[in-house]
């Protein structure tokens, strides 16, 4: 007799050997289950049971999710990558370049011309930095956070002893997620209603606000508390990183005999993991900043940086983190709101003045968020499987929607980049008194439309794949064909909104 809906037990629980569960299992603040439960779900022996076939064949199979259990340790196959992580000077140099770029954005924002066509800081911030960050989720998890310049000043102060080093309060563990979600909504709201993308000084204020948050937290607390609990961008990047092609993990077999835990605690001369995890404490992509510090600190060569199937964590995770459950509806809701105001409603809204625009966007943002939240809950109800004894409660609809949310964000950011790229050099020239007006080129709407359709179609197929794996493998016997079709129908409803509000306007211009 098949188990009844709601009494699902994860197949991975019994399939994975007990010794893969790490002994370091702090409580997870972002969901019901402990890290131990999560580790059972998402950890695999890193590249231990090397599979047959060339690295390339294995890589293709992994990327296509044909062999979701396989991993390739990129530190072994790409030695320069290991050098990059181990040689902290190279890492520091990349960081210094980033710090200089951000200093330029802030200085140029405050002191440079306020005319958007004469200030390149805008394009660097919104056309280069943010789209690169969105792309990096997919390829390298939270790698951006490993080279992010925002925590830099705080780290310098901490190393000089200028920190109260207070214990992280319980409310940050518990409510940091909601605060970060609120801050993220605030940034999106300000971005659209205050025209940050067209305002050099507004962009500079935004950068300064994030810098101030990171600085204040590092003066009060040890390590990068801002990054772990409060940074809105960090939360988004963390959620996006769940569908990354890569993961940083430990080889727990090597960790079994470890007595130093240097990856987490550091050594006498060097600080440990900035988010107090260490490779041994990493069981998902949401919190590890991929800074690689633990790679240089571990004397057992335990940390690995794996190529993996981008679906594996989404499928094993099943949308059980609170972050994902709220951030994904917020992200997707904001995308629908941004599409709506950029597309069919744009002229109508603009004609009623800036205050009306603010009101309408606020309503669109709230409506979009509630709509996707309702889809997540309805999807869960239709599945009929929303928890088990080991993992606690989860939202199976969230993993199905994650690829679409990623695609929606990428489309919005790339559109800005590609429509403003032709004017980058002329703007640079205007800002610094040179004539670079000839260094421009056209970008056709056909190309934009092609890009949008390609990204959106890939994300839809990824969402359908996850849905299929849930139905046929993870929840086998629990989800009837009728329920499966109903969830697909729900997905189609969401996709319709994306197509009508976001894709169709570009198509109509491109063809
Ligand atoms: S969490 Fe935020 S401040 Fe911290 S490294 Fe990431 S983006 Fe930068
Ligand atoms: S220092 Fe190395 S061996 Fe020790 S716990 Fe950390 S990753 Fe494992
Ligand atoms: S676990 Fe390693 S890579 Fe991840 S944040 Fe900590 S030190 Fe950096």
Image (cartoon, helix red, strand yellow):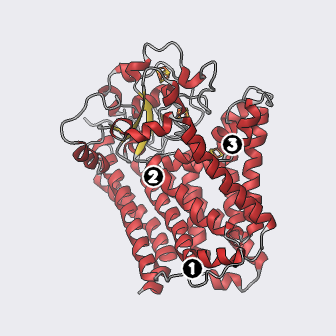
Secondary structure under the numbered disc 2 in the rendered image: helix
Label 1: few (<14), some (14–19) or many (≥20) C-alpha neighbours in 10 Å? some
In-image side of 208 versus 131 (left or right): right
Looking at the rendered image, the quarter that the C terminus falls into is: bottom left
Disc 1, SS: loop
Tag 1 and tag 2, C-beta contact below 8 Å: no
Residue labelled with disc 1: 343
Residue lying at 42% horizontally and 25% vertically, measured from the top left: 302
Along the line of sight, which residue is nearer the eye, 336 or 156? 156
Spot occupied by residue 210 in the image (x, y as percentages of width and height): 72, 50
Which residue is more in the foreground, 475 or 93?
A: 93
Sequence-wise, the earlier of marks 1 and 2 is 2
Asked if residue 186 lies left or right of residue 319, the reply is right
Question: In this view of the protein, which residue sits in the foreground, 7 or 366?
Answer: 366
Q: Nearer the viewer, mark 2 or mark 3?
A: 3
Taking 439 as reference, is 456 above or below it?
above
- Residue 129 point in image, percent of width and height: 59, 59
Where residue 144 sits: x, y (%)? 55, 48
Residue at numbered disc 3: 151
Quarter where residue 123 is shown: bottom right
Q: Earlier in the sequence, mark 1 or mark 3?
A: 3
Label 3 crowding class (10 Å Cα cut-off): few <14, some 14-19, many 20+?
A: many
């Amino acid at each position: 007799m098949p188990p009844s809906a709601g009494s699902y037990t994860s197949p991975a629980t019994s399939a994975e050997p007990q010794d893969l569960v790490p002994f370091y299992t702090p409580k997870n603040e972002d969901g019901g289950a402990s890290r131990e439960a999560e580790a059972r779900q998402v950890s695999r022996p890193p590249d231990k049971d090397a599979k047959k076939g060339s690295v390339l064949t294995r890589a293709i199979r992994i990327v296509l999710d044909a062999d979701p259990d396989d991993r390739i340790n990129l530190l072994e196959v790409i030695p320069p990558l290991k050098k990059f992580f181990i040689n902290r000077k190279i890492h520091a140099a990349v960081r210094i370049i980033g710090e200089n770029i951000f200093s330029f954005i802030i200085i140029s924002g405050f002191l440079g011309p306020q005319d958007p066509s004469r200030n390149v800081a805008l394009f660097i911030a919104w056309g280069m930095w943010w789209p690169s960050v969105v792309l990096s989720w997919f390829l390298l998890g939270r790698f951006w956070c490993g080279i992010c310049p925002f925590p830099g000043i705080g780290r310098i102060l901490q190393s000089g002893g200028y920190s109260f080093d207070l214990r992280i309060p319980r409310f940050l563990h518990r409510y940091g997620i909601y605060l970060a979600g609120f801050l993220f909504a605030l940034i999106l709201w300000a971005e659209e209603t205050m025209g940050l993308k067209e305002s050099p000084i507004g962009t500079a204020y935004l950068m300064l606000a994030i810098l101030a948050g990171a600085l204040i937290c590092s003066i009060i607390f040890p390590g990068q508390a801002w990054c772990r609990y409060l940074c809105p961008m960090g939360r988004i990047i963390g959620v996006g990183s769940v569908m990354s092609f890569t993961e940083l993990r430990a080889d727990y077999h090597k960790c079994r005999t470890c007595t130093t835990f240097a990856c987490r605690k550091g050594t006498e001369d060097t600080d440990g993991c900035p988010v107090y995890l260490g490779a041994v404490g990493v069981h998902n992509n949401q919190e590890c900043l991929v800074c690689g510090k633990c790679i240089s600190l571990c004397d057992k060569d335990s940390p690995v940086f794996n190529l993996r199937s981008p679906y594996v964590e989404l499928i094993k995770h099943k949308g059980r983190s609170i972050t994902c459950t709220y951030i994904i509806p917020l992200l997707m809701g904001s995308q629908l709101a941004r599409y709506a105001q950029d597309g069919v409603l744009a002229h109508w809204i603009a004609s009623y003045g800036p205050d009306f625009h603010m009101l309408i966007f606020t309503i669109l943002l709230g409506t979009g968020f509630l709509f996707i939240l309702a889809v997540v809950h309805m999807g869960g109800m239709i599945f009929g499987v929303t928890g088990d004894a080991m993992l606690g409660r989860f939202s199976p609809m969230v993993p199905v929607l994650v690829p679409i949310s990623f695609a929606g964000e990428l489309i919005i950011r790339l559109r800005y980049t590609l429509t403003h790229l032709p004017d980058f050099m002329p703007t640079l020239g205007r800002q610094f008194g040179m004539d670079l007006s000839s260094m421009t080129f056209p970008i056709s709407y056909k190309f934009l439309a092609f890009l949008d359709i390609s990204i959106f179609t890939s994300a839809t197929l990824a969402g359908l794949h996850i849905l299929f794996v849930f139905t046929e493998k993870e929840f086998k016997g629990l989800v009837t064909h009728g329920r499966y079709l109903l969830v697909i129908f729900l997905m189609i409803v969401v996709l319709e909104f994306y197509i009508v509000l976001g894709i169709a306007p570009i198509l109509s211009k491109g063809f």
